[in-house]
Image: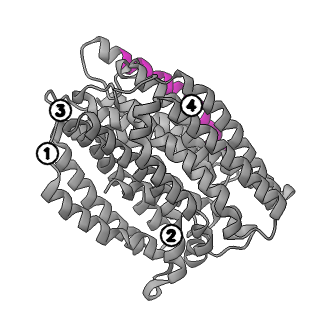
Amino acid sequence: GAALPMIDFFIVNVALPTIGSDLHAGAATLEMVVAGYGVAYAMLLVLGGRLGDMVGRRRLFLWGLAAFGITSLACGLAPDAWTLVAARVAQGAAAALLLPQALATIQATTSGQRRAKAVSLYGGTAGISSALGQVLGGLLVSADLAGTGWRAVFLVNVPIAAAAWLLAARTVPETRSPHPTRVDGPGTVLLAATLITLLLPLTEGRAAGWPLWSWLLLAAFPFAAAAFAVVERRAERAGRTPLLPPSLLRIPSVHSGLSVIVPFSVGFGGFMFVVAVALQTGLHYGPFAAGLALLPLCLTFFLASLAGPRLVQRFGRRVVTAGSLIQAAGLAGLALTVHAGWPGVSVAGLAPSMAVLGLGQGMVLPVLLRIVLSELPVAQAGVGGGVMVTTQQSGLALGVATLGTLFLSLLPTLGTRDALLAALLTQLALVLGTTALTFRLPRTLR
């Protein structure tokens, strides 16, 4: 259940060319297929966490799973591009109800080593789901099951959601906050405005030719963010429970962990998008080969995430620092492979650097998630999980927008190889900056 939202953020990357030709959709509309899901998802995640605290996390998890299955079916049956966009927005909203409940349930029902193992498994799932989404998307589009083509990338969710629903109904315990609070209406509206004014123009503006509305929204972003901060601070001072309590961000593990999650997610999201486009347009890989190239990253990421609890117990925050440096080595190796081997780079040629990259990322993300959650009170498990996943999701969307825009802007003048190298080296600089931030993390974990 927790894998589905992350898989579906990336699964369409390798299917977009096929969707465009089948539904006669232009670049701006195809961007909305990605952005509509991502913006709705990021915008409602904190609210999803708060609602789970109020009405019960198991109950909302089941509602979210059912809604995700239904909206996936709507995506798969969409007769035209704008119907697909609308269904993707609804799918993103369903994902926002579903995902925070997984982390909140882990927080509320486990402790000690059991919690460490559960959070590491969750982090590993979140990480490999991103890469697996593109592998699975490429496989399904290439297989063209029963003539479904790109529609299979959405229809496959229906039986998975149904199976997850049945398992969750039988095994997941019900938990909720002991002191549930009302939904913060003004905070919810202002958070939505903040995320929309930032993410929508950044993800859609380039494809639409940077029209006036995109610049107006970007200009409005700092004002919306400032208003949100003021309203939340006043609500907490007045004794109410805001959507995002400022006191939550003053917890050292939360503050330092989120400060590392943001640049990590920006780089990760941008990398997945740029590689999917570059392999298909520059190296002329088919959808399956483009997805298969990421398989070594998936495998090493998952193995590293499983080793995380033991490594953290022995080395503390140094695991994140070492993982960040290993990730940098993987990016440098990938850039050298592309520079030396283009245009004859094979899937096997990419495998060593992809494996190193996945190893480093698998040592970073699951541990970061555990750090953010380590000092959260159980009563704030839902909202804390929602804040963390919102930060991660917003970072992924920003990465697609920024590194993706850099790559696509350089493509006509530099060509695919040099545009890809520019994106990889930009991400490498970001990773080195992230490494410096890891020294602010708590030395040991509870």
Cα–Cα span, label 4 and label 1: 41 Å
Residue matched to label 2? 137
Measured Cα–Cα span from mark 4 to mark 3: 35 Å
Q: Earlier in the sequence, mark 4 or mark 3?
A: 3
Magenta residues, dominant SS class = helix
Q: What stretch is highlighted in magenta?
A: 211-233
The residue sitting at the right extreme is 413
Tag 3: residue type?
A: Ser
Identified by mark 2, the residue type is Gly
In the image as oriented, which residue stretches furthest toward the top? 237
Would you identify the image quadrant in which residue 265 lies?
top right
Task: Name the one closer to the observer, 364 or 78.
Answer: 364
- SS for tag 2? helix
**Separation of disc 2 and disc 4 at Cα?**
36 Å
Which residue does the numbered mark 1 point to in the structure image? 174
Question: Is 220 within the magenta?
Answer: yes
Quarter of the image with the N terminus in it: bottom left
Closest to the observer, 4 or 33:
4
Say which residue label 3 marks: 177
Judged left or right of residue 302, residue 183 is left
- Is residue 128 rendered to the left or right of residue 209? left
Circles 2 and 4, Cβ within 8 Å, touching? The answer is no
- Real-space CA distance between mark 2 and mark 1, rounded to the nearest whole angstrom: 33 Å
Residue 81 position in % (x across, y down): 51, 69
